Structures are given as structure tokens and as C-alpha cells.
Amino acid sequence: MNLTEDSLYVWHVPLAAVRAQIDHLNGFLSLDEIAWANQFATAPLRDVFVLARSSFRILIGKAVGMPPEEIRFIYGPYGKPAINGVALRFNLSHSGDWAAVALAWSCEVGVDIERIRPIPELEEIARAHFSAAEASELLSIPAEKRITEFYRCWTRRESRLKAIGVGLSGANGQPGTWTDTRSSSHAAESPIPCPEDLFLNLLFLESPQDYVTALAYSGARRNVYQVQLNTATDLLNIQSVWNSSESEASSRRRGLARMSWRRMHA
Ligand SMILES: CC(C)(COP(=O)(O)OP(=O)(O)OC[C@H]1O[C@@H](n2cnc3c(N)ncnc32)[C@H](O)[C@@H]1OP(=O)(O)O)[C@@H](O)C(=O)NCCC(=O)NCCS
């Protein structure tokens, strides 16, 4: 299984399951990341940061052929991590018990995962953060179906922001010029700054139950592969998976059957 120029990988990592290895995983973080981790107000928030960051490092390390602890991130103007001089693009998102990590060569990529949970102030948030068309479409659907659609809209927008590399702070009031393949009717209203030539593909990924994951990436359509890890051992065994050029079937024979492999689209 190789990360080729025409492919893109998204890994779902079970943070609750990998927590058993937190002391080991903590060793992959840089000194500045350890300092950030120690600034979180609560231990659970700190742990999520450590687990997601270390998983991120393991997966990036396998793609670029570096030990996870030797990766040196640089950060864009709004905080998007990258590696200087390396064409690998990557993005991380976490929510609840899951993290999602997207990896691709030479295209901008953004991923957002959200755990679906009730939101009493859903209407206010939709009106404040979504375009007028998106908010009115959302509020026109039956209340019992609204929450999932809310998270689809949220993650779709967030994945775009993350592909472009701006946080919400970078999108204030600036008109968007991007296009996406699914909902171009909303594009003109979206206040997202984007280079004229950045065409974003957008898709929803298969996700753990009660989660929504959206992926945005630039350029020509790619083969998108998904891998769902189930245990800490799966994560620590990534090296053997990533280096393997064997077929999915032979990977399974080598004892990796617990991971779920899916090809999303070509
Ligand atoms: C990064 C950002 C874009 C998303 O944050 P989030 O949804 O809270 O968090 P996620 O778990 O999805 O992503 C966090 C990761 O994204 C990456 N990231 C940070 N800044 C980023 C940026 N500007 N662009 C892309 N990725 C970024 C980091 O790897 C970060 O991981 P960390 O927690 O280890 O530092 C945030 O800065 C932001 O502004 N969010 C906007 C929130 C909002 O109101 N959105 C409205 C959508 S309708």
C-alpha cells in the first residue's frame, strides 16, 4: 500500500483505544508540543492532544520515511502545520474518541471529524456560521433529521477552511472564490478566502458510528483510501503496513485484518 501522487489516505484513529499507550506516544512529541499539552486546563484535554498529535506524527513519519519524533513542523499564518521543503500535505482533526488524519502528496488537504451530539442552539449557530442558503436549507428539513445535516454542513465548511489553511479567524468577511464538486450553489455566498486557482474536491467519508467526517482537497480527483484503526497495536504497527507494497489481501494475511480498508472513489 503506497501513497502515490494520485492517491490520498485518510486514517481514523481510535483515541480511547490508543490511550493505553499514552506514555509511549508522549515520547514522540517535540518540546514545544509538550509545553502546549501542559497548558490544557484538564487532563482529558491534554491527553487528547497528546494522542492525536503522536498519531499524526506516526502516520506522517511513515509517509516521509522519518521517525515520528524527528519531524519538525512549521506553521502557516493561521496555524496549519507543514514540513519545510516536503511536498507531503496533511491534516488532522479530532472529536470525541476519534481522530482523522489525511495525507497526500502535492495537493492541499483539509479534514474535519465531528461527533454527532445534540445542540440546543443549533438554529443560532447555523445562522451565525453558515451561508444564508445553507442555513435556510438546514432549517427547512424535519427537526429529527436536522442534527446530522448540521454536522455535515459544519464539517464540509471546516474541511474547506482547513484545506485552504485558514481558521475561522482568517475567513472574516472575505468573499470566497473557490468551487467544490458537490454544492457549487453555495459557493458564491461562502466567506472563505481562497486562491482563484484552488479547486476543492469535497466528499464525506465513511466514519465511526455517530461521527461525520468531511474531506476537502485541491486539484484533480484522486483515489481516496480510508483506513480505520481499532487498537493501539494497529497504530504502532503502521510501519509494516505503510512500507508494504503488497495487495490488501496479502496485508490481511500478514495479520492486519483488524483494520478496515476502503477505497472511496477514483
Ligand atoms: C484549526 C481550525 C480551522 C479547526 O479547529 P477545530 O475544528 O477546533 O479542530 P480540529 O480537531 O478539526 O483540527 C485541529 C487540528 O487542525 C490543524 N490546524 C491548526 N490550524 C489549522 C489551519 N489554520 N488550517 C488547517 N489545519 C489547521 C492542527 O493540526 C490541529 O491539531 P492540534 O489540535 O493538534 O493543534 C480552527 O482554527 C478554527 O478556526 N475553527 C473554526 C471553528 C468554527 O467556528 N468553524 C465554523 C465552521 S461552519
Image (spheres, rainbow, N blue to C red):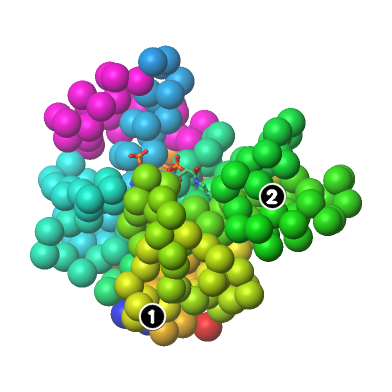
Q: Position of residue 123 (x, y in %)?
A: 72, 42
Q: Residues within 10 Å of mark 1 (few under 14, many from 20)?
A: some
Q: Write the start and end of the magenta stretch as one range.
A: 13-40
186 or 15: which is nearer to us?
186
Q: Residue at x 88, y 51 (%)?
A: 142
Pointer 2 residue = 150
40 or 137: which is nearer to us?
137
Chain-order first, disc 2 or disc 1: 2
Number of marks present in the image shown: 2
Q: Residue at x 29, y 19 (%)?
A: 39
Mark 2 beta carbon near ligand 1 (under 8 Å): no
The label shown at residue 244 is: none
Q: Is residue 224 visible?
A: yes
55 or 111: which is nearer to us?
111
Q: Please say whether residue 16 is one of the residues in the magenta stretch.
A: yes
Residue at disc 1, secondary structure: loop
Residue at disc 2, secondary structure: helix
Quadrant in which the N terminus is drawn: bottom left
- Classify residue 230 by image quadrant: top right
The label shown at residue 219 is: 1
